[in-house]
Image (cartoon, rainbow, N blue to C red):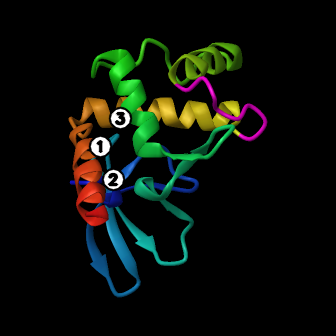
Amino acid sequence: MGLDKILSISGKPGLYKVITQTRTGFIAESLIDKRKANVNIHSNVSILSEIAVYTLTEELPLRDVLNKIKEKENSQPTSISHKDSKDTLEEYFFEVLPDYDEDRVYASDIKKIVQWYNLLQKHDLLGALQEDESASSEEEE
């Protein structure tokens, strides 16, 4: 499963994976508690494969940022919690992505990214990062 099947739903905690489409939206399953949710087509949904992080030179796809965290943590959970202080989160993110744009990437964004990485790691979905990379390189050829 690639990152295009994993999403964040505004107002709901954690990440969801798409189970099936319906006429009015889709059904998604929470990675936190495995509960299924009927998501209306008008809900504010962000697909992880379409999210990018601002750097000083470009917008870096979330997949690349998560890969950098994966490399730093050796595919293990992060050494910090998403509940740590703003300074701790920013310091950690600076180690992962030294050229991130501090004016446009907020502590709340870093908190989400750390939480999302840990959820993906816990559910053995970090392989989705490689799947997306191979799919995008095949498209370029």
Give coordinates of residue 13: x percent, y percent.
49, 45
Please, what is the dominant secondary structure of the magenta stretch? loop
Asked which secondary structure carries label 3, the reply is: helix
Q: Are marks 3 and 2 in contact (CB under 8 Å)?
A: no
The relative height of residue 114 versus residue 30 in the rendered view (above or below) is above
Single out the mark in the foreground, 3 or 2: 2
Badge 1 is on which residue?
Answer: 129
Badge 3 is on which residue?
Answer: 119
Q: Say which amino acid is labelled 2.
A: Leu
Query: What range of the chain is rendered magenta?
Result: 97-104
Which residue appears at 28% of the width and 52% of the height?
132
> Between residues 43 and 108, which one lies in front from this camera angle?
108
Badge 2 is on which residue?
Answer: 3
Q: Say which amino acid is labelled 1.
A: Leu
Q: Earlier in the sequence, mark 3 or mark 1?
A: 3
Real-space Cα separation, disc 3 to disc 1, in angstroms: 13 Å
Is residue 98 on the magenta stretch?
yes
Which residue appears at 35% of the width and 73% of the height?
26
Which residue appears at 46% of the width and 32% of the height?
115
Q: Say which amino acid is labelled 3.
A: Leu
